[in-house]
Amino acid sequence: MKAMNKLGRILLVEDDPKDVELTLTALEEYNLANEVIVARDGEEALEYLYSRGKFKTRSSGNPAVMLLDLKLPKVDGLEVLKQIKSEEKLRMMPVVVLTSSKEEKDMVASYKLGVSAYVVKPVDFHEFVNAIKELGVFWAVINEPPPGSVRK
Amino acid sequence: MARSKLRLRIFQSPVLRYGLAVLSVSVALGGALLIERLQLRNITLFLFAIAVAAWYGGTGAAVLALLLSCISFAYFFVEPSHTLYISRAHIPYFILFVLFAWLVSWFSSVRRRVEADLLQAHDKLKIEVSERSSLLNLTHDTIFVRDMSDSIRYWNRGAEELYGWTPEQAIGKRSHELLRTVFPSPLDDIQAEFLRTGRWEGELNHTKADGTQVIVASRWSLRRDEREQPIAVLETNNDITVRKRWEQEIQSLNQKLAMRSTELEAINTELEAFAYSVSHDLRAPLRHMAGYTELLQKKATSTLDDKSNHYIKMVLESAKRMGNLIDDLLAFSRIGRAETQNTLVSLEQLVREALTEVRDDTEGRNIAWKIGALPDFYGDRSMLRLVLVNLISNAIKFTRTRPQAEIEIGCADGNEDDLAIFVRDNGVGFDARYANKLFGVFQRLHQASEFEGTGIGLATVQRIIHRHGGKVWAKGAVDGGATFYFSAPKPRGHL
């Protein structure tokens, strides 16, 4: 695969281990899982992005895309989004909201905060795998991320 | 009053009037003769007699007294005495006397006329005042006048009717004590404002003669004399007890209403949180079930027997169905919560849009469409569209078994105020006995193996039409097709 040599790093922010497993499985199926970092709540996601806490020693650079769940412990998804978009170094990073909720107010709030895409996880696993694959391929491979993003 | 009556009485009888003239002059003459005998000459007594005659007898008596005085004077006191002849030397003296006498009588009569006029004006005023009082008695308003020491001076019939005291009982009493007035603010403040502006308006609490309380809208106006000194207060009161009670009732109803709507708001918020939770938390495990089952299927399908594979398939189907149910239920609850944005909507346009939306379902089907003229409808465009989409896709679904499906959309004869639209098909129909179940949530009259669906479509239709103030109903028979109707109030100023 030609794309393999420039696969972008994906930050997956998801608290539910089953969702993490299923998402990783879906990405694996298309060889997109190599560069996935998982944060289990909003705080951890911010720690990663600001290179602090347990991510103090991580290699520098922003992920090519962040897949963000909205319902998260500690700091919820919308709050994470708000902080990212008000930070000069982070605001250009593409963020895809990946959530169970089809609630309009969440959607409106997310777009207002400048999210790149809003994806509702389909119940059907087949559709779910397809959605994750397309997201992975588009954001981690096809899309040209802003300068300063980590590429393999 | 009694004194002035006596002083100003005029003798009515002519005998009395002229007799008075004669008598007073005679008395004056006697007095004058007596004084003459005592070597004193005095004409003052005659002038006094003329004045008395003029005062009490009027002009005629004055003239007679003047004449008699002249003759007496000429006869007794002007030389030569005891004749009416007047010597040349005494003529100026006599003329002087006549002049004085005439002046006295003139002054007297003028003064008497002025006093008579005054008396007449006074009588007129009295009549006017009593007329005015009776006018004030005509009004239903409560009016009384109190002086600056709060003592009641006038009390009209309205006051008597409202408070129960007669004018005789009320006049002279202190009004605030009698009525046990409760003021909205300290009396001193009210009084200060009143004296400054000359007016005051406010609500007062009074106690009637029978002890019951009244609330009055009170208006005071200040009366001043010509030196701008305040002399009296005119107080006009209107009984607003009933109005006040209504106001209080309305207020308490409003409070209750506000409480109810707060409650409703809380329930709505709860409902929203519930829907959100359903949307989020119920879908996640469902997705996991479906996901892991599919992974299992993928990994183990070759090692599993047919039965096991069938079970897996059933789990997946159920998960999918539950996903659809949750989605439909959420959409249904959203319709109840969403705000309607009403405009005038062309139903013909809306039907065209609905037909485009259901085009996929009609592929490979033989359907004869019959679409009549449709009116404009006042309502929420996207909601009405959903109504048409649901009804039309139902018609498409339940005519599936017909080689030639017929679907008709038209305007039924509504009544004067309502529009009625129908969607008719020649499909499998329904048992009329269960017609009332058609519009319930998740109610289905067909087995899932015959016709798919969650049973939310018609419930959604009903909810939308109810929100538009309309009705839904259906007619049908087993295997005899079905007709679904919905009605809504006609757009005002239209059709």
Image: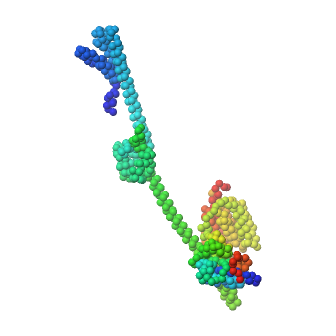
B62 relative to B203 in the view: left or right: left
The residue sitting at 26% across, 18% down in the picture is B31
Q: Is residue B105 above or below residue B281?
A: above
Which residue is farthest left? Answer: B38
Q: Position of residue B169 (x, y in %)?
A: 34, 45
Q: A119 or B320, which lies in front?
A: A119
Q: A106 or B487, which lies in front?
A: A106
Whether residue B355 is visible, yes or no, is: yes
Q: Quadrant of residue B268?
A: bottom right
Q: Is residue B92 above or below residue B408?
A: above
The residue sitting at 39% across, 50% down in the picture is B188
B124 relative to B286 in the view: left or right: left
Q: Position of residue B212 (x, y in %)?
A: 38, 53
Whether residue B437 is visible, yes or no, is: no
Give the quarter of the figure containing the N terminus of chain B. top left
Q: How is the image coloured?
A: rainbow
The residue sitting at 70% across, 75% down in the picture is A146
